[in-house]
Image (cartoon, grey):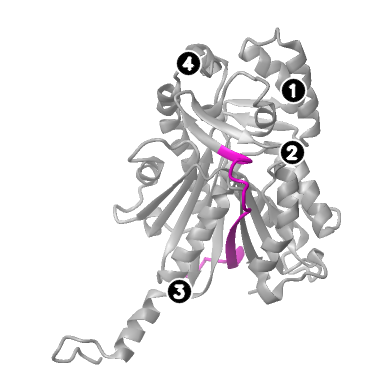
Amino acid sequence: MTKANGNGAVPVREGQRRSMQQHAQGPAAMLAIGTANPTGVVIPQDQFADDIFRMTKTDHLTQLKEKMKRICQKTGIEKRYFHVNEESIGANPEFLDRKLPSLDARIDMVSTAVPKLAQSAATKAIAEWGRPATDITHLVFSTYSACQAPSFDLQLATLLGLRPTVSRTILSLNGCYGGGRALHLAKQLAENNHGARVLVACAELTLVCFGAPDGSNLIGTALFGDGAGAVIVGAGPFSEGERPLFEMVSATQTTIPRTEHVLGMQVSRAGVDFHLGIQVPTLIGQNVKQCLIDTFGTDAPCSDWNDLFWAVHPGGRQILDNIDTVLKLEPGKLAASRHVLREYGNMSGATIVFVLDELRRRRKEAGGDNPLLPEWGAMLAFGPGITIEAMVLRAPPLHE
């Protein structure tokens, strides 16, 4: 080994060797996936309007309820999971009046519930991974419910028994692109830190934004549900038993200019207020192709996007329909996204993890080495900004 010279300088070749040791071998990959939902309340979409108007004591608003029923019928959702129930609403009547302060009460409830829900998903991912939780070197936690410090990242690390040296990052109020952003960051961490294993955790509870239906929140109320997703991300060299589910080849983040007021969230004394403009699906449809071209670069299959598999955040049925139309996708290309929307609704940043989990399940059932299955794919997530997270994925054959 070459030693430092008299001035304490390290020769270039030694510095290069150390630099090489700091980086991983090859692109990052998702190594395990886990998901979880609250066990308290499951509401079928066809009875959601009746239930929510009864629970919030707004049954007298008959025209508004009928409007909500029509919206629910068009969402493509069959059921959703919720942490909030009639008991918690009865104990906190201030949740129903946006003029009353309720943020403190909401934070008290989610500060325990969100980390526990994330723990359920993370425990599944760690068990599938097959290594001890103490081997996790980094934690990235995305949520729109965090309004305190220390935050959910530290609570989750404690619940899982992670090492005190784990490097934690909390992503707050990224909304529906939070899962994509967290995975993007995990890719960078894994590839630039030799031997790193990153736990991505996304957990969302609509409790922080729950309120009585009114003329401004019907669409969001009809779409959003509760859930958590977790992914273990790492890069080579892989240890025995580790097998990449999806390689994370390249990633981009794009903000559509002059759309910051179209989709967003605002923390107020009455909780988190969502603003969801009706033009969101159209704007995403108009910009998604260029985002994909930027992400794939010269390898973009612009002639036929059907050559790929797709993991798309199901922000709503119209968003998926517009992407189908713009990219001229064959029927079934967005089947995993539509399945998650139907079974869980929009769980904001956690939803993309459910889509990835469903996609890998379908690929396994079809046969991982099936030559008819695309090897290359794309992941898309959308959120406030309007921000689009895009990632090129590769699904290695089972024999690799």
State the CA–CA distance, disc 1 to disc 4. 24 Å
Closer mark to the observer between disc 1 and disc 3: 1
Q: Is residue 66 above or below residue 341?
A: above
The residue at which mark 2 appears reads as 342
**Amino acid type of the residue tagged 3 in the rendering:** Ala
Residue 388 is left or right of residue 15, and the answer is right
How packed mark 4 is, by other alpha carbons closer than 10 Å (few <14, some 14-19, many 20 or more), is few
The residue at which mark 1 appears reads as 68
Q: Tag 2 or tag 3, which sits nearer the N-term?
A: 3
- Secondary structure of the residue carrying tag 4 is loop
Taking the magenta stretch, the answer to whether it contains residue 259 is yes
Q: Is residue 377 above or below residue 119?
A: below
State the CA–CA distance, disc 4 to disc 2. 34 Å
- Residue 60 at x, y = what percent? 70, 7
Count of labels in the image: 4
Q: Which residues are magenta?
A: 239-264
The residue at which mark 4 appears reads as 100
The residue at which mark 3 appears reads as 24
State the CA–CA distance, disc 3 to disc 2. 38 Å
How packed mark 3 is, by other alpha carbons closer than 10 Å (few <14, some 14-19, many 20 or more), is many
